[in-house]
Image (cartoon, helix red, strand yellow):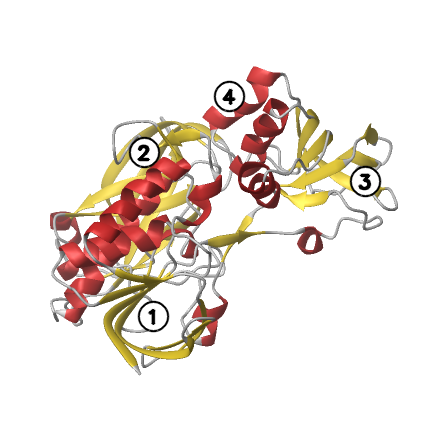
Amino acid sequence: MLSYDIVVIGGGPAGLAAAIEAKNNGVDSILVIERDRELGGILQQCIHNGFGLHIFKEELTGPEYAEKFIMELKGLGIEYKLDTMVLDIREDKLVSAINTEDGFMAINAGAIVLAMGCRERTRGAINIPGTRPAGVLTAGTAQRFVNMEGYMVGKKVVILGSGDIGLIMARRMTLEGAEVLAVAELMPFSGGLTRNIVQCLEDYDIPLLLSHTVTEIKGKDRVEGIVIAKVDENRRPIPGTEKHFECDTLLLSVGLIPENEISEKAGIKIDPVTSGPVVNEAMETSIEGIFACGNVVHVHDLVDFVTEESRRAGKNAAKYIKKEIRKEGLMADTKPGNGIRYIVPQRIRPENVEKALDLFMRVDDVYSEMNMVISIDGREIKRVKKRHLAPGEMEAVKIKKDDLMASEYSVITVSLEKEGA
């Protein structure tokens, strides 16, 4: 049986950052397990720029951002296994994994960091009626074909969903010579960053159809056309509003789902809103010694935020190994209030916070001129003005440790109030 102090599951941006931070905090026995053929995760196929503005103060492509961490990981001598699939993790932190070189492995871990990322929601998950011709792909699959494998997936394209990957692929397909006819979005607002709407759609005159969805896919062997209809306030297609687009490809960018099958098998508590583990201030899950970070916890909009969160998980995993995390004392829950969809972390032990704690959250609609109000058991401790809020952009608020330690309490609430109300 193999034994390591820390086993990191996932060699993408989250896993790399967590492993490096754990090493820098005094733990030498670390193993990173990655199921793909190379480290770097999804970043390897994200050849567009816009990464690294927060962490490195420069604009990098996805592979450049990943390479900085891969080189640092190798420079520190951290062990990693590629083409290796984790089959199971147990509550006693025994990891079962398999690859073609080592065969089946039982790995005993002192602590585990979950960094498996997320996957795309598929056509089957959204129940689009119609036949099943070739030419229906998720946006991420199309991105891999075009950017890494060298295959062009289509010439006339319709995209359903305005998540960041869908927006970026609208631009990418256009640059490769395809005609992107439209991007349809079920909600009355886009699910992507404002900068991507501007740079990927508006700069290329690609129409964004809000409150629209695909109602039919036409074609036998290959997609021949798509029918798009406007939806009402209940997101149901409105008869008579159908538009037909002649195309050979439909790309789906209809949401991301954190990869938590092995987390659930281990008995880790899952938040029904984020579909990720419930974590505390140390990024520790409901099972002691198992930590989680990045898109496996909740879907981030910027990889820089993934890195910051994963460093926190790696540092606390190292502290756990060194028995420096306090397990007793006050424990409080975070609670999303008016306008807030979820908050991460969901649980907080103030004694383990160093100077301040960042709460990450997303709003449930588009808002303007609002106040974000943070309260502890109904007592307001902070108020932040927000000119614009949208579900596609993650929000963060910092709470000082002094405020957390001020008194006995049980619930921290974040809610939105109209400015001047």
- Whether label 2 touches label 1, CB < 8 Å: no
Residue drawn at 42 percent across, 39 percent down: 301
Q: What residue is drawn where x is 39% and y is 35%?
A: 417
Gap between marks 1 and 3 measured at Cα: 46 Å
Q: CA distance from mark 3 to mark 2?
A: 38 Å
Kind of residue indicated by mark 4: Gln
Task: For mark 1, give the secondary structure.
Answer: loop
Give the camera-side residue of 105 and 391. Answer: 105
Q: Where residue 348 sits: x, y (%)?
A: 25, 59
The answer to whether marks 3 and 2 mark residues whose Cβ atoms lie closer than 8 Å is no
Give the distance between the C-alpha atoms of the residues marked 2 and 4, in whole angstroms. 18 Å
* Marks 2 and 1, the one that precedes in the sequence: 2
Disc 1, disc 3: CB below 8 Å? no
- Identify which residue, 393 or 149, lies in the foreground: 149
Query: Callout 4: 10 Å neighbours few (<14), some, many (20+)?
Result: few
Residue assigned mark 4: 199
Residue 52, disc: 2
- Check disc 3 and give the amino acid type: Val
Identify the mark at residue 286; answer none if there is no mark.
Answer: 1
**Label 3: few (<14), some (14–19) or many (≥20) C-alpha neighbours in 10 Å:** many
Dot 4: element: helix
- Give SS at disc 2: loop
Rendering coords of residue 161 (x, y %): 63, 38
Q: Where residue 244 appears, x then y in whole percent?
A: 84, 30
Q: Is label 3 in a helix, a strand or a loop?
A: loop
The answer to the question of whether label 3 and label 4 lie on touching residues, with beta carbons closer than 8 A, is no
Q: Is residue 376 visible?
A: yes
